Image (cartoon, grey):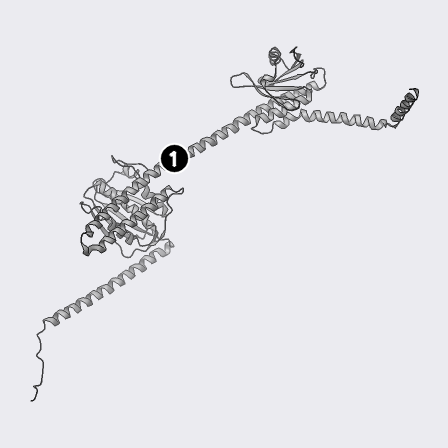
């Protein structure tokens, strides 16, 4: 036993002698420095948490963790004042950062009330619990209560005699500011989200309204096409009874088929996201008008409606969508017929040197319009008809916009109405007049040739008639000698 004791003494003597006192003191100093550094780091957590962030819970969690580290409490929670001026439990954590609910805490309410009325208060409560030491720290900004920090621990919590007490009070002041900032940012973030949601709902409502409008547009335009298709098929059936008119049957059915294709293109275009995509190509406006008039003839065959054409042969070709142009003419003519059952409609084409545009006017002898009405007629869903929808002229204006053109109206009460559509030539302005003049000369030259050809044909015909009326000449012959 004595030998063992001697050996142990020798061992500990050697161990003590081998310890470097300077290193130990340096290590202790480093630990103290690290502890102070860690304390200051946690003390500044509210300042870092005050940076703009809409995540209030994350801000509370960071500050609560810092408070637990600084005070060495074992768990705690934040209660914040709500809109009803009552304290509401927001977040609870223990020192291991595990989530705790309000039910996990037995709150000393008198202590909390006392702290709110005065200042940070420390006390003991819950004698049945191991967590006897409690701190209730109110969070104020200029006498405005933001909330309460409540801490519990089995060991004494930071006391007023501790040098860190005043620093912790500074920590609480910054905590109140950080929480209020986070609340403001959350309100702003929620308001922005609500705004975005409302905008999305508004866009969705607009889309639904747009779909409803498009459906009405489609119905309006398809009705126009259907009346033409029906009239052409009806005429084809009449021609079918006469075998000699079979070519006319095919012609009318072909026109009906063409209108069906235009109708399909129209409905698909209107239902598409970007609306109708015009099929622009260089065309003769006169040919489009001729095609339109030929198509609508069967519709007004048994009515008193008269459609006349005065087309300038020298207008240049324009870049248009033939189907959309027919659709536009359909709406204008239909309006004229609805205004007067025995309408006389004159469609003219000409070149306007002033605007450098090819124009077409659709003139009727209807009741005319007031100046006030003329200002409204192109608005969507404006109508003064009992069974009208107010889409026709709005669609016409939309069609002209797609062609970079224009549509205007000239009208007086009891003097009829004239709609004028203008289409650009898609050439430089200084060459527009030259293009028209060139075409005008070509037309004059063509007309002269036709006139000369007609005169020559007339002369030939006169000669033939004169030759038929001339007396027959006796044939000279020599008698045959026998």
- In the depicted structure, whether residue 305 falls above or below residue 91: below
> Percent position (x, y) of residue 350?
28, 53
Question: Which quarter shows the C terminus?
Answer: bottom left
Secondary element under disc 1, as helix, strand or loop, is helix
Where is residue 383? Give x, y as percent: 28, 36
Name the quadrant of the N terminus: top right
| Residue at 8% from the left image edge and 75% from the top image edge | 472
Q: In this view, does 49 lie to the left or right of 452?
A: right
Q: In which quarter of the image is residue 410?
A: top left
Q: Residue furthest front?
A: 1
- Residue 433 seen in the current view: yes
Find residue 317 and report its horizontal and vertical position in percent: 33, 55
The foreground one among 399 and 359 is 399
The residue at 22%/54% (across/down) is 248
Point out the residue furthest to the bottom here.
482
**Which residue in the protein does label 1 denote?**
208
Crowdedness near tag 1: few (<14), some (14–19) or many (≥20) residues, C-alpha within 10 Å = few
| Left or right of 180 in this view: 413 | left
Give residue 347's position: percent from left, percent from top.
25, 49
| Residue 378 appearing in the image | no
């Amino acid at each position: 036993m004595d030998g063992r004791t001697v050996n142990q003494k020798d061992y500990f003597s050697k161990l003590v002698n081998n310890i470097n006192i300077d290193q130990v003191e340096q290590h202790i100093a480093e630990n103290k420095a690290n502890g102070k550094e860690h304390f200051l780091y946690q003390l500044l957590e509210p300042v870092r948490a005050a940076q703009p962030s809409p995540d209030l819970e994350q801000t509370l969690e960071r500050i609560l963790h810092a408070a637990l580290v600084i005070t060495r409490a074992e768990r705690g929670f934040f209660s914040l004042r709500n809109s009803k001026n009552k304290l509401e439990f927001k977040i609870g954590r223990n020192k291991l950062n595990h989530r705790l609910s309000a039910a996990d805490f037995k709150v000393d309410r008198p202590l909390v009330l006392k702290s709110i009325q005065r200042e940070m208060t420390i006390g003991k409560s819950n004698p049945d619990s191991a967590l006897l030491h409690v701190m209730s720290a109110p969070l104020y900004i200029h006498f405005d209560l933001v909330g309460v920090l409540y801490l519990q621990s089995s060991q004494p919590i930071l006391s007023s005699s501790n040098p860190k007490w005043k620093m912790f009070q500074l920590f609480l002041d910054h905590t109140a500011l950080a929480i209020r900032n986070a609340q403001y940012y959350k309100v702003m973030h929620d308001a922005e989200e609500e705004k975005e949601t409302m905008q999305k709902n508004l866009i969705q409502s607009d889309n639904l309204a747009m779909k409803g409008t498009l459906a009405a547009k489609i119905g309006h335009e398809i009705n126009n096409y259907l009346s033409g298709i029906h009239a052409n098929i009806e005429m084809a059936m009449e021609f079918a009874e006469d075998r000699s008119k079979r070519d006319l049957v095919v012609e009318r059915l072909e026109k009906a088929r063409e209108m069906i294709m235009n109708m399909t293109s129209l409905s698909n275009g209107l239902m598409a996201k970007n609306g109708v995509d015009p099929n622009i190509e260089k065309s003769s406006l006169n040919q489009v008008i001729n095609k339109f008039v030929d198509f609508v003839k069967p519709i007004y065959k048994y009515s008193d409606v008269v459609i006349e054409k005065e087309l300038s042969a020298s207008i240049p070709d324009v870049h248009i969508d033939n189907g959309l142009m027919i659709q536009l003419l359909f709406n204008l003519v239909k309006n004229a017929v609805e205004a007067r059952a025995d309408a006389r409609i004159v469609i003219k084409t000409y070149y306007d040197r002033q605007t450098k545009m090819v124009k077409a006017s659709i003139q009727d002898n209807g009741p005319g319009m007031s100046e006030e009405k003329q200002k409204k007629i192109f608005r969507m869903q404006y109508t003064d008809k009992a069974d009208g929808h107010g889409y026709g002229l709005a669609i016409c204006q939309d069609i002209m916009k797609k062609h970079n053109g224009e549509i205007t109206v000239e009208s007086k009460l009891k003097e009829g109405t004239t709609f004028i559509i203008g289409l650009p030539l898609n050439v430089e302005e200084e060459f527009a007049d030259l293009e028209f003049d060139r075409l005008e000369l070509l037309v004059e030259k063509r007309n002269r040739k036709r006139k000369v050809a007609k005169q020559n044909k007339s002369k030939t015909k006169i000669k033939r008639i004169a030759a038929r009326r001339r007396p027959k000449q006796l044939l000279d012959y020599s008698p045959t000698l026998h």
